[in-house]
């Protein structure tokens, strides 16, 4: 069993569309009876996938997606008009940078909603495998660092820590959600007090794996702890906090037959908040983590990947993008031109499925083939099988892109293809890593 102890502060103000007015809440007293409280989920996540609960979730998510889409469209329109006479004006250049960042932020906001929706409502059978918990923790911390600037965290991992039998993407999302809860609490407190960094510890206890994420806050939670698992619960007044963090975490834990519990304990002048998750544990392998790491400050930089690619790419580099969405293909092309075009003659071709097959039939020189899985008239899988049988010299050039959030058929193909692949949307360093893997002959998912 995995014992996951996560200390975090999660205040709430609304649940299932009912808004709570914090000023009218009765904050728990600090009597002896209130020094420790506990709360567990009171529902099965299967009840969220039908009837009124499902309808409510669909409407809430549609609203959440609609807001960033409006921002993206609006900022795109501004940029379109803004760039006509931007040359030579520094003030407009600064605004252009700001607008571009807003578009990126809002797009990632949509991506997060999609990931949470799949985790919450999907009935796909999980595909567990042995995972290096230390590496997945570092990935989760990198992700939350982008959202919660100023919060520091340190990982301490016990030597010879056993692996956990879990689906990596689900484990990473679970850790991201509970870490985000801790970071939100710390950032809220930073305005008034100086807190210690979040401490993340992983160790074995009584034949179980225990992960603790610990931070302290100054006030107790205003609601009963079991309410914190309900969908759409948040005390933040802005609409950027959807209130699905613990709901999604509980859905993942339940999917893997685990349990989840919150505790709140009085500690000196403040409180410690903990989330306790128990999950099955695989003892089949032993890991050798690097020990104590300031994971919040560790991140693979695109410049480092570019330097590594320069050693593998010659003076000419040809990329074929097989994609039925012109805007996606154009975006990939522009990114590669920006990152690689300064030191190599980059030839990036965008093609539909039939045109791509014609290029390979003509024997075109192609160094990398970035192929989408879900094409309008066929599939990336079908194209790959054709290439394997007719033009095997191109087989090792393939890497796959997909926005399919872990569909069983797609996932089965990707894992069995022996080719590297990347989920959309992706960050710049992930795209560069994908290209690097193709050139080095590596396989598997780019995280």
Image (tube, rainbow, N blue to C red):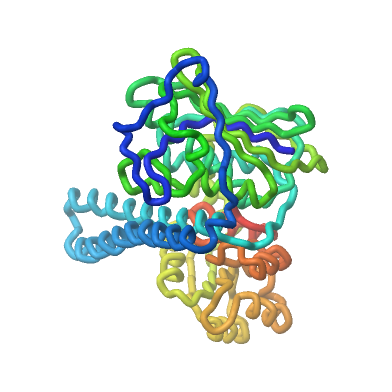
Task: Name the image quarter holding the N terminus.
Answer: top right
Q: Is residue 445 left or right of residue 32?
A: right
Q: Measured from the top left, where is residue 345 in percent x and y?
A: 48, 66
Q: Nearer the viewer, residue 164 or 95?
A: 164
> Which residue occupies 68% across, 44% down?
258
* Residue 420 figure quarter: bottom right
How many discs mark residues in the rendered view? 0
Residue 27 point in image, percent of width and height:
39, 26
Percent of width and height locating residue 97:
29, 51
Residue 18 relative to residue 357: left or right: left
Tell me where residue 150 appears, x and y as whole percent. 41, 32
Q: Residue furthest top?
A: 268
Q: Tell me the quarter of the picture where residue 147 sits.
A: top left
At a point 47% along the width and 34% down the height, the residue shown is 224
Relative placement, left or right, of 208 versus 227 is right
Whether residue 115 is situated above or below residue 283 in the rendered picture: below
Displayed quadrant of residue 194 = top left
From what the image shows, is residue 335 above or below residue 215?
below
Judge whether residue 88 can be spotted in this image: yes
Which residue lies at the image location 66% right of the left edge and 28% below the top edge?
291
Which of these two is toward me, 7 or 294? Answer: 7
Say which residue appears at 50% left-offset and 74% top-offset.
Answer: 323
Relative vertical location of residue 328 with respect to residue 249 in this rendering, above or below: below
């Amino acid at each position: 069993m995995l014992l996951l102890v996560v200390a975090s502060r999660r205040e709430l103000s609304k649940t299932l569309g009912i808004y709570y007015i914090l000023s009218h809440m009765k904050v728990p007293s600090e009597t002896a009876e209130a020094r420790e409280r506990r709360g567990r989920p009171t529902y099965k996540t299967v009840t969220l996938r039908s009837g009124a609960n499902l309808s409510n979730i669909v409407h809430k998510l549609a609203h959440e997606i609609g807001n960033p889409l409006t921002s993206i469209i609006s900022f795109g329109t501004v940029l379109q008009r803004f760039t006509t006479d931007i040359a030579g004006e520094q003030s407009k250049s600064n605004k252009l940078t700001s607008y571009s960042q807003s578009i990126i932020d809002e797009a990632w906001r949509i991506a997060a909603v999609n990931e949470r929706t799949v985790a919450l409502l999907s009935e796909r059978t999980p595909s567990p495998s042995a995972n290096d918990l230390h590496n997945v923790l570092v990935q989760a911390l990198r992700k939350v660092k982008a959202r919660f600037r100023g919060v520091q965290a340190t990982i301490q991992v016990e030597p010879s820590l056993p692996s956990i039998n879990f689906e990596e993407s689900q484990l990473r999302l679970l850790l991201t959600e509970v870490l985000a809860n801790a970071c939100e609490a710390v950032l809220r407190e930073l305005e008034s007090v100086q807190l210690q960094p979040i401490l993340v510890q992983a160790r074995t206890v009584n034949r179980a794996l225990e992960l603790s994420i610990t931070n302290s806050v100054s006030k107790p939670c205003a609601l009963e702890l079991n309410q914190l698992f309900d969908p759409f619960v948040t005390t933040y007044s802005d609409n950027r906090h959807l209130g699905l963090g613990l709901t999604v975490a509980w859905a993942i834990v339940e999917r893997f037959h685990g349990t989840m519990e919150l505790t709140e304990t009085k500690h000196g002048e403040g409180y410690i908040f903990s989330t306790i998750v128990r999950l099955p544990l695989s003892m089949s392998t032993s890991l050798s983590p690097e020990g104590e790491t300031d994971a919040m400050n560790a991140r693979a930089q695109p410049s480092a990947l570019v330097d590594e690619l320069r050693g593998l790419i010659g003076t000419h580099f040809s990329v074929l993008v097989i994609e039925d969405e012109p805007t996606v293909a154009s975006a990939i092309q522009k990114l590669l031109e920006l990152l690689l075009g300064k030191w190599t003659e980059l030839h990036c071709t965008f093609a539909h499925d039939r045109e791509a097959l014609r290029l390979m039939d003509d024997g075109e020189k192609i160094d990398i083939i970035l192929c989408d899985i879900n094409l309008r008239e066929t599939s990336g899988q079908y194209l790959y099988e054709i290439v394997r049988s007719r033009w095997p010299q191109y087989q090792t050039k393939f890497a796959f892109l997909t926005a399919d959030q872990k569909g069983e058929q797609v996932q089965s193909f990707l894992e069995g293809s022996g080719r590297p692949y990347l989920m959309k949307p992706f960050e710049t360093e992930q795209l560069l890593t994908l290209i690097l893997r193709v050139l080095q002959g590596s396989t598997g998912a780019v995280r």
